[in-house]
Amino acid sequence: MRKIPNFIPLQTALIDDIRIKRLNREYLNCSGLGILIGLYFYLLKNPNFTCSYDEIDIIAEELKASIPVIITVIERYNLFHVIKDSSGNKFFSPMLNNSLKPYFEVCEANKLKSDLATLKRK
């Protein structure tokens, strides 16, 4: 099981992404960006960084946004991918997953070094 990172290593180019600019244009005072980051935090808490559409009502309540707004942010701006399986629709963020790759690579390398050091001590 992967450890939940203490931070989200987002790329600074995110703010110049045309999708984010459109999101901010539609939702004033950067509330769209706030919803995006809130969705990222929610995804981090879920296995495989995916979330079921069945949880959107809970997410909307936590983020103080309406369900249609959350669904719009997920579906309209191409910031998330939606997949269908036997349990219904789920969404994930390729951008978040790519941002987390270096973090998990470092975690894995540190774990291997720690395991090797433990073996050497024995």
Image (cartoon, helix red, strand yellow):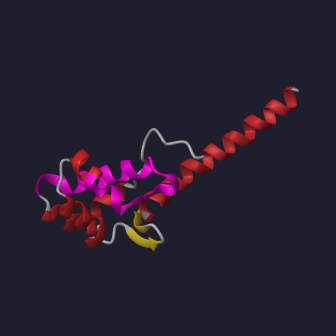
Find residue 106 and report its horizontal and vertical position in percent: 61, 46
What range is drawn magenta here?
28-57
Q: Nearer the viewer, residue 20 or 47?
A: 47
**Dividing the picture into quarters, in which one does residue 28 lie?**
bottom left
Find residue 83 and report its horizontal and vertical position in percent: 43, 72
> Is residue 41 on the magenta stretch?
yes
Residue 15 lies left or right of residue 88; in this view the side is left
Looking at the image, which residue is at 37% across and 53% down? Answer: 40
Q: Nearer the viewer, residue 101 or 52?
A: 52
Residue 28 lies left or right of residue 81; in this view the side is left
Find residue 96 and report its horizontal and vertical position in percent: 43, 57
Find residue 36 and report its horizontal and vertical position in percent: 29, 56
Q: Magenta span: helix, strand or loop, mainly?
A: helix
Q: Is residue 121 above or below residue 4?
A: above
Which residue is situated farthest in the left direction here?
A: 28
How many numbered marks have been drawn onto this rendered protein structure? 0
Which residue is situated farthest in the front direction here?
A: 86
Residue 14 lies left or right of residue 8; in this view the side is left
Which residue is situated farthest in the top direction here?
A: 121
> Is residue 91 on the magenta stretch?
no
Looking at the image, which residue is at 39% across and 71% down? Answer: 82
Residue 79 lies left or right of residue 3; in this view the side is left
Quadrant where the C terminus is found in the figure: top right
Looking at the image, which residue is at 17% across and 56% down? Answer: 66
Looking at the image, which residue is at 28% across and 50% down? Answer: 58
